Image (cartoon, rainbow, N blue to C red):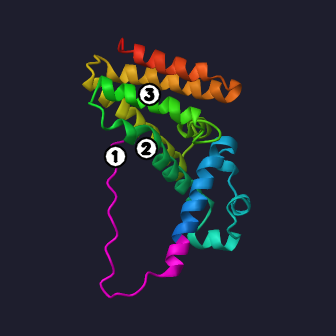
């Protein structure tokens, strides 16, 4: 889950103006995917409907179905958008820190802030969708699993750099603390649960 480096679109060589329809389609795609990702943390990915998303975004049903072939395509876009938000708020701000213990501390601090700031209204996207798709198969379930694996791999990499003898075990413990904190924070709204998760996670390495 290293920072992405997006390619900048090349200017048009023919001098023609960009296609306005494409720009509108891209805007619709992004707005619907964002709203789908946010809603999924409260109601679940399975609860997403074109009608509900149309009402929440102001786009027509036909407009949404022009850029998304079906509901599954919207669900997949929601997972992709959630990954973008998770990286933006948790991963990328930690990257200037040195690998290992400093970066792990930054990741955990960013995760606590991401929860407290309510980036997703229903808590951590990874936590909520993991429960929903834990025993299921198909493209959406695979996308959720890939997102979880990517996060765990990042934790293991930083734990290894920090000198952990058993990075997979330590990543398991940290992930468990964060998932518990996300759930309890949504239930009780107590910041102490987020702080506790960060403290216990750092204690894995005696930090």
Identity of the residue drawn at 34% across and 58% down: 6
Q: In this view, does 19 lie to the left or right of 56?
A: left
Measured as percent of width and height from the top left, residue 65 is found at 63, 70
Q: Relative to the observer, which residue lies in front, 1 or 88?
A: 88
Q: How crowded is mark 3: few (under 14 residues within 10 Å), some or many (20 or more)?
A: many
Question: Magenta stretch: dominant SS?
Answer: loop
Identity of the residue drawn at 39% across and 29% down: 106
Tell me which numbered mark, 1 or 2, is placed earlier along the sequence. 1
User: Does dot 1 land on a helix, a strand or a loop?
Assistant: loop
Measured as percent of width and height from the top left, residue 22 is found at 50, 76
Does the segment drawn in magenta span residue 3? Answer: yes
Q: How many marks?
A: 3
Q: Name the residue under label 2.
A: 87
Q: Mark 3 points at which residue?
A: 108
Judge whether 128 appears above or below 13 on screen: above
Measured as percent of width and height from the top left, residue 70 is found at 61, 64
- Do the CB atoms of the residues marked 1 and 2 lie less than 8 Å apart? yes
Q: Distance between the residues labelled 2 and 3?
A: 13 Å
User: Does dot 2 land on a helix, a strand or a loop?
Assistant: helix
Identity of the residue drawn at 30% across and 30% down: 157
Q: What stretch is highlighted in magenta?
A: 1-25
């Amino acid at each position: 889950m290293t920072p992405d480096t997006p390619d900048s679109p090349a200017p048009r060589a023919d001098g023609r103006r960009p296609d306005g329809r494409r720009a509108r389609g891209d805007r619709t795609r992004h707005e619907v995917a964002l709203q789908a990702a946010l809603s999924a943390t409260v109601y679940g990915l399975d609860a997403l409907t074109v009608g509900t998303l149309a009402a929440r975004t102001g786009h027509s049903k036909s407009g949404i179905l022009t850029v998304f072939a079906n509901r599954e395509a919207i669900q997949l876009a929601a997972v992709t958008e959630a990954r973008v938000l998770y990286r933006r708020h948790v991963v990328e701000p930690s990257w200037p820190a040195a690998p290992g213990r400093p970066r792990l501390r930054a990741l955990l601090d960013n995760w606590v802030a991401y929860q407290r700031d309510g980036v997703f209204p229903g808590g951590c996207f990874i936590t909520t969708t993991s429960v929903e798709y834990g025993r299921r198969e198909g493209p959406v379930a695979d996308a959720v699993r890939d997102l979880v694996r990517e996060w765990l791999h990042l934790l293991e990499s930083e734990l290894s750099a920090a000198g952990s003898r058993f990075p997979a075990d330590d990543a398991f413990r940290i992930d468990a603390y964060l998932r518990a904190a996300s759930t309890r924070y949504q239930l009780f709204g107590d910041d102490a649960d987020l702080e506790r998760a960060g403290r216990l996670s750092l204690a894995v390495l005696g930090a």
